Image: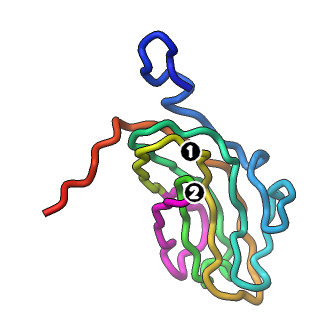
Amino acid sequence: MTDDAQGEPTAADRSSWWDREIFLDSDGGHCPSVIDVTGRARYLFFGPYLPLSPGRWRATVTLHLCPDAARCRLALQFGAEPDYDTVDLEFGVDGDHVVTVEHRRAEPGLGQVRLWLKKAAFHGEVRLSGAAVERIGDFEPAISD
């Protein structure tokens, strides 16, 4: 959303909370409170496909990993098709996690946060609280040498 009069981001475009209940699970249903990691490599949750205007964005995601899930190869991604930024979760660290991913957008897009199970897993659980998403600045093209 932008202010029509000046084309500047509105307050709603600068910061919001994306609660677990608006995310989707790997089957496209609503994200459950407990996500079973058992199975093939896949996105354990994704969405919610909310508008992101051009600019620099930060997602701060709060989740919990049981000891078995902490031994899985997991990565958190934030962005909009076709461009995402990725942060690998620290292997073997269970408990509460607060993970930050920053993303730059040159064009508007439908934003999502997704948790990628990079290899098949036998057992484990993840609990997503949600993500604080905020616009942290204007888009600045990368400087090439």
Locate residue 137 relative to residue 101 in the image: left or right.
left
SS state under label 1: strand
Residues under numbered marks 1 and 2 in contact, where contact means CB atoms less than 8 Å apart: yes
Residue 60: image tag: none
Magenta span contains residue 32:
no
**3D distance between C-alphas at marks 1 and 2:** 7 Å
Magenta span contains residue 88:
yes
Locate residue 39 relative to residue 71 in the image: left or right.
right
* Picture layout, residue 121 above or below residue 48: below
Q: Residues within 10 Å of mark 2 (few under 14, many from 20)?
A: few
Locate residue 16 relative to residue 142 in the image: left or right.
right
Majority secondary structure in the magenta region? strand
Residue 104 image position (x, y, % from top left): 40, 49
Q: Could you tell me which residue is drawn at 75 percent across and 85 percent down? A: 40
According to the image, label 2 marks what residue?
81
Along the viewing direction, whichever of 28 and 127 lies nearer the viewer: 28
Q: Could you tell me which residue is drawn at 52 percent across and 40 percent down? A: 108
Colour pattern of the rendering: rainbow
According to the image, label 1 marks what residue?
109
Total residue callouts: 2
Q: Amino acid at mark 1?
A: Gly
Residue 56 image-quadrant placement: top left
* Picture layout, residue 102 above or below residue 65: above
Residue 119 image position (x, y, % from top left): 64, 87
SS state under label 2: loop
Q: Residues within 10 Å of mark 1 (few under 14, many from 20)?
A: some
Write down the region rendered in magenta: 82-99
Q: Could you tell me which residue is drawn at 43 percent across and 52 percent down? A: 103
Residue 67 image-quadrant placement: bottom right
Along the viewing direction, whichever of 57 and 8 lies nearer the viewer: 8
